[in-house]
């Protein structure tokens, strides 16, 4: 399912549309970035749509040997994309790479870190934390994994706080509804 931000961002790089000019396109890109800023974590890097498109083209045009060389930067661009669809594509490629390709421990840690970032960007914080822990088992002082672990913990705390606020508001709304259901008939009887 395409979000509104993805829908808007699909127009920002097509300069052939008759109703757009460079100023309009730049304004739309700024607007899309503004909308996305409410959901993004700014302490992780981001890849713009033009860079992802460039990597898509390069990966599609490459032969097998070249694809193996550019696979990691391509998947990294997908995982760090601003668009959820790209993140999901990167996550699928990472799942395949982790399950079906053998590599040394250092390379495996890099793949697992990217997989943790992909899970984080998809809102799957427990899975992300699991892969971060696996990275830290391989290299306990990995600063990127430690940073991501801190970001995950902060995000989980924030979402728990939001959940508590929503639950409190829901309970308050239920209490208000019950009181209204009790008081309104009493008032109607009194006036009647």
Image (tube, rainbow, N blue to C red):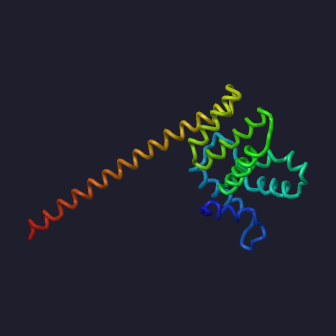
Residue shown at 59% from the left, 42% from the top:
127
As drawn, is 14 to the left or to the right of 189? right
| Residue lying at the far bottom of the rendered structure | 18
> Which residue: 71% across, 62% down?
12
Residue 89 x, y percent position in the rendering:
71, 54
Relative image position of residue 174 (x, y in whole percent)? 29, 55
Task: Indicate left or right for 109 with 152 as reference.
Answer: right
Rendering quarter of residue 189: bottom left
Q: If the image is split into quadrants, where does the C terminus sit?
A: bottom left
Which of 168 and 64 lies nearest the eye of the viewer? 64
Residue at position x 43%, y 46% from top?
Answer: 163
Q: Position of residue 111 (x, y in %)?
A: 74, 40
Give the x, y percent position of residue 32.
64, 57
Q: Is residue 153 above or below residue 31?
A: above
Q: Is residue 24 visible?
A: no
The N terminus is located in which quarter? bottom right
Q: Nearer the viewer, residue 4 or 24?
A: 4
Answer yes or no: is residue 51 visible: yes
**Between 178 and 93, the one nearer to me in the picture:** 93
């Amino acid at each position: 399912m395409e979000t509104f931000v993805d829908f808007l961002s699909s127009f920002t790089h097509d300069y052939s549309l008759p109703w757009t000019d460079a100023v309009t396109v730049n304004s739309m890109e700024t607007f899309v970035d503004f909308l996305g800023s409410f959901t993004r974590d700014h302490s992780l890097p981001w890849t713009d749509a033009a860079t992802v498109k460039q990597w898509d083209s390069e990966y599609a045009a490459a032969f097998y040997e070249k694809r193996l060389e550019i696979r990691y930067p391509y998947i990294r661009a997908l995982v760090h994309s601003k668009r959820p669809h790209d993140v999901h594509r990167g996550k699928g490629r990472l799942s395949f790479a982790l399950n079906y390709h053998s590599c040394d421990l250092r390379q495996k840690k890099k793949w697992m870190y990217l997989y943790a970032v992909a899970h984080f960007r998809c809102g799957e914080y427990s899975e992300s934390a699991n892969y971060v822990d696996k990275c830290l088992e391989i290299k306990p002082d990995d600063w990127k994994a430690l940073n991501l672990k801190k970001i995950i913990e902060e995000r989980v705390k924030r979402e728990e706080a939001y959940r508590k606020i929503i639950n409190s508001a829901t309970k308050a709304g239920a209490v208000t509804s019950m009181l209204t259901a009790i008081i309104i008939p009493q008032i109607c009887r009194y006036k009647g």
